């Protein structure tokens, strides 16, 4: 049969070679994820704790979390907001959070009327107040609309937390209170680390607030 239909044998060999190549790609990406993930959290653990401490302090004073991001990072903004609004762990209270990227009418109106660089500044002015905390996601760190909103947040007395990739881009020069930078140029690896980082931020914030609630009980025991 191989003699009669040599193209069939070649086709089978090509398919096996292609499958093997794809498997190597999977393994390579998994190794890259593990390496970047480990490096990021080894380098940024203290900053993540500091960011959670700032956010917990904001909640203690009646503040809220405001979140922003573009494209895939807007999904991270939505995700972190819903984590605080709707905690999945039993016994943890809902905490105020606003996704500044949620209102499509607002975003498109501002983008059309005054420009994309202002799409987060306008809702921040409307919703933000002294003592709140603003978190922004950008895989490059160079999103101009985030940088403008961070600058406005500082004027308003709002604490700032940035999550970026690469070398931090413009976020690294924006004077943020906290900046978590994933040391890679891979957008996918950056987003994977951002996801884990804000899940940990959520958990640490609740832990700090729970410790506050427990302290009076221990004092009166």
Image (cartoon, rainbow, N blue to C red):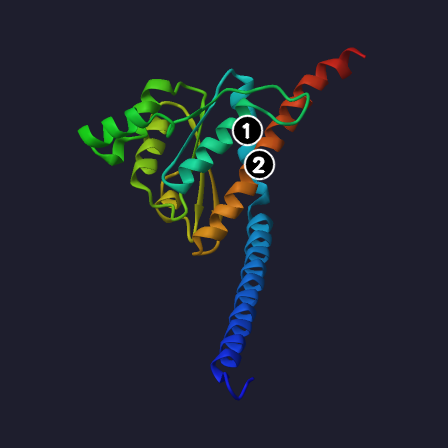
Residue underneath mark 1? 83
- Name which residue lies at 71% across and 14% down: 216
Q: CA distance from mark 1 to mark 2?
A: 8 Å
- Name which residue lies at 23% across and 32% down: 111
Q: Position of residue 127 (x, y in %)?
A: 37, 19
Q: What count of labels does the image hold?
A: 2
Q: Where on the picture, by quarter, is residue 90?
A: top right
Q: Nearer the viewer, residue 32 or 156?
A: 32
The answer to whether residue 157 is above or below residue 145 is: above
* Residue farthest top in this picture: 220
Label 2: how many Cα within 10 Å (few below 14, some 14–19, many 20+): some
Q: Where on the picture, by quarter, is residue 138?
A: top left
Q: Position of residue 147 (x, y in %)?
A: 33, 37
Residue underneath mark 2? 199
* Residue farthest bottom in this picture: 3
Quadrant assignment for the C terminus: top right
- Disc 1 is placed on an element classified as helix
Quadrant assignment for the N terminus: bottom right
- Name which residue lies at 57% across and 36% down: 199
Q: Are marks 1 and 2 in contact (CB under 8 Å)?
A: yes
Label 1: how many Cα within 10 Å (few below 14, some 14–19, many 20+): some
183 horizontally vs 221: left or right: left
Residue 213: tell me if it is visible: yes
Q: Earlier in the sequence, mark 1 or mark 2?
A: 1
Q: Where on the picture, by quarter, is residue 101?
A: top left
Residue 47: tell me if it is visible: no
- Disc 2 is placed on an element classified as helix
What is the number of the mark on residue 60? none
Q: Position of residue 131 (x, y in %)?
A: 45, 20
């Amino acid at each position: 049969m191989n003699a009669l239909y040599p193209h069939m044998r070649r086709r089978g060999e090509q398919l096996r070679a292609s499958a093997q190549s794809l498997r190597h790609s999977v393994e390579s990406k998994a190794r890259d994820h593990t390496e970047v993930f480990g490096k990021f959290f080894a380098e940024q653990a203290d900053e993540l704790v500091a960011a959670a401490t700032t956010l917990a302090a904001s909640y203690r004073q009646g503040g809220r979390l405001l979140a922003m991001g573009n494209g895939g990072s807007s999904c991270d903004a939505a995700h972190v907001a819903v984590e605080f609004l709707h905690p999945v762990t039993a016994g943890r209270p809902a905490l105020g959070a606003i996704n500044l990227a949620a209102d499509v009418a607002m975003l498109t109106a501002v983008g059309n009327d005054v420009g994309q660089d202002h799409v987060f500044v306008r809702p921040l002015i409307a919703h933000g107040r002294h003592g709140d905390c603003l978190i922004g996601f950008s895989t490059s760190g160079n999103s101009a609309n985030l940088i403008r909103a961070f600058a406005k947040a500082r004027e308003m007395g709002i604490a700032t937390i940035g999550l970026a990739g690469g070398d931090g881009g413009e976020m690294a020069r924006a004077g943020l209170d906290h900046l978590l930078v994933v040391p890679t140029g891979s957008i996918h690896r950056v987003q994977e680390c951002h996801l884990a980082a804000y899940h940990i931020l959520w958990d640490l914030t609740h832990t700090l607030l729970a410790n506050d609630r427990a302290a009076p009980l221990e004092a009166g025991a």
